[in-house]
Image (cartoon, helix red, strand yellow):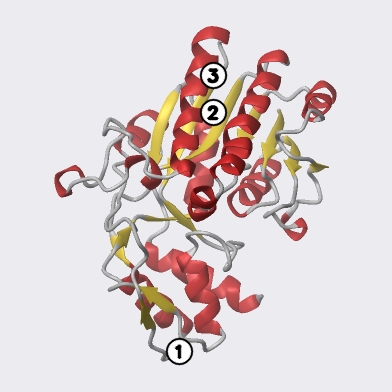
């Protein structure tokens, strides 16, 4: 099939592009390279350097006529969204609507959207961990609000215009190609610090937990979302909580070094616990994570070492 991938020079999307091309699809990447890297681009993909909010996107759709769209381009920093909610909404909401309008006009069969898990559900009480899709979404950041807004728009375009969609609510994705200087990339940040023999900073006590899912498993979920005859929102994670302290210990062990972290002030308003219940993805997509945390950390550390 002809497939457009927005944000295809980024961390997750570049792995997805590689897999799609390996499966024999013709892939078109749309990315403005604001955070994506040219070196991540698959040379067999056709590339347009373009903002998803640009009026020029219409010309890309008119020429390429994709059957499927994977939408991963985004302003991805929660902190940036708090500092500049107008910019966040222009990229993440208005840019997405621009994309959806082209999907509607050129009869795209399905769009798969990269949403968020933790930023949608916020600080769920202990009894609701791991958190299901049915838990009330009350985002506490413009980033989370934008992602939820796009899910509502997706449902609107499906109900009114018949544009099929899947929104994948990712937990904390990690793996090769993640930006060590990016938002929420604690695994990448620690890998970079440890391999350069720098003491990484852990904010607060380090007991705060997240649900870490390997990028290869996320790509598997995206492929299944394209293939399966399903519509709706799906959590994509492991359902397991891992503390920041434990993540650091696993990275140090995989790197074969001895170094201790520094502890800094806790981030104001930081979520204490997060994990996603993925039963819906297992039942309807036939998906479950394949890569253990130890295996994934090992692969990631080796990639950073090679860089």
- Apparent side of residue 218 relative to residue 278 in the rendered image (left or right): right
How many neighbours does mark 3 have within 10 angstroms: few (below 14), some (14-19), or many (20 or more)? many
Question: Farthest residue in the bottom direction?
Answer: 258
> Which residue carries the number 3 mark?
164
The label on residue 155 is none
Q: Which mark is residue 227?
A: 2
| Camera-nearest residue between 41 and 202 | 202
Graded by Cα atoms within 10 Å as few (under 14), some (14 to 19) or many (20 or more), the crowding at tag 2 reads few
Query: Could you give the CA–CA distance between mark 3 and mark 2, rounded to whole angstroms?
Result: 12 Å
- Dot 1 falls on a residue whose secondary structure is loop
Residue positioned 35% across, 78% down in the render:
249
Image height of 120 relative to 56, above or below = below
| Residue 72 in sight in this render | no
Is residue 133 found left or right of 222 in the rendered image? left
* Residue depicted at x 39% and y 68%: 294
Which residue position holds label 1? 257
* Residue 80 drawn at (x, y percent): 54, 53
Compare residues 213 and 136 and report the one nearer the observer. Answer: 136
Going by the image, does 279 lie left or right of 127?
right
Residue contact between numbered discs 3 and 2, judged by CB atoms under 8 Å: no
Residue at image coords 55%, 10%: 162
């Amino acid at each position: 099939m002809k497939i457009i991938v927005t944000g295809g020079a980024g961390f997750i999307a570049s792995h997805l592009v590689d897999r799609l091309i390996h499966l024999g699809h013709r892939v078109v990447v749309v990315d403005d390279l604001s955070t994506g890297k040219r070196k991540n681009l698959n040379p067999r993909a056709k590339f347009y350097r373009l903002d998803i909010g640009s009026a020029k996107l219409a010309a890309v759709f008119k020429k390429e006529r994709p059957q499927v769209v994977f939408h991963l381009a985004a302003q991805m920093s929660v902190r940036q969204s708090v500092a500049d909610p107008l910019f966040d909404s222009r990229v993440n909401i208005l840019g997405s609507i621009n994309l959806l309008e082209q999907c509607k006009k050129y009869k795209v069969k399905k769009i798969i959207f990269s949403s968020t898990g933790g930023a949608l559900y916020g600080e769920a009480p202990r009894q609701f961990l791991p958190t299901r899709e049915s838990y009330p979404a009350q985002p506490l950041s413009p980033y989370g609000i934008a992602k939820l807004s796009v899910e509502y728009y997706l449902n609107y375009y499906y109900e009114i215009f018949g544009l099929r969609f899947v929104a994948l609510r990712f937990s904390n994705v990690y793996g090769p190609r993640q930006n060590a200087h990016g938002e929420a990339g604690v695994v990448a940040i620690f890998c970079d610090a440890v391999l350069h023999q720098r003491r990484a900073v852990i904010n607060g006590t380090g007991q705060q937990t997240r649900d870490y899912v390997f990028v290869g498993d996320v790509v598997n979920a995206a492929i299944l979302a394209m293939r399966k005859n399903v519509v709706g929102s799906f959590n994509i994670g492991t359902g397991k909580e891992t503390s920041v302290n434990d993540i650091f210990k696993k990275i140090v062990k995989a790197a074969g070094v001895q170094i201790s972290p520094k502890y800094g002030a806790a981030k104001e308003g930081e979520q204490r616990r997060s994990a996603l219940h993925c039963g819906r993805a297992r039942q309807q997509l036939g998906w479950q994570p394949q890569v253990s945390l130890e295996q994934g950390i090992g692969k990631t550390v080796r990639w950073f070492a090679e860089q």
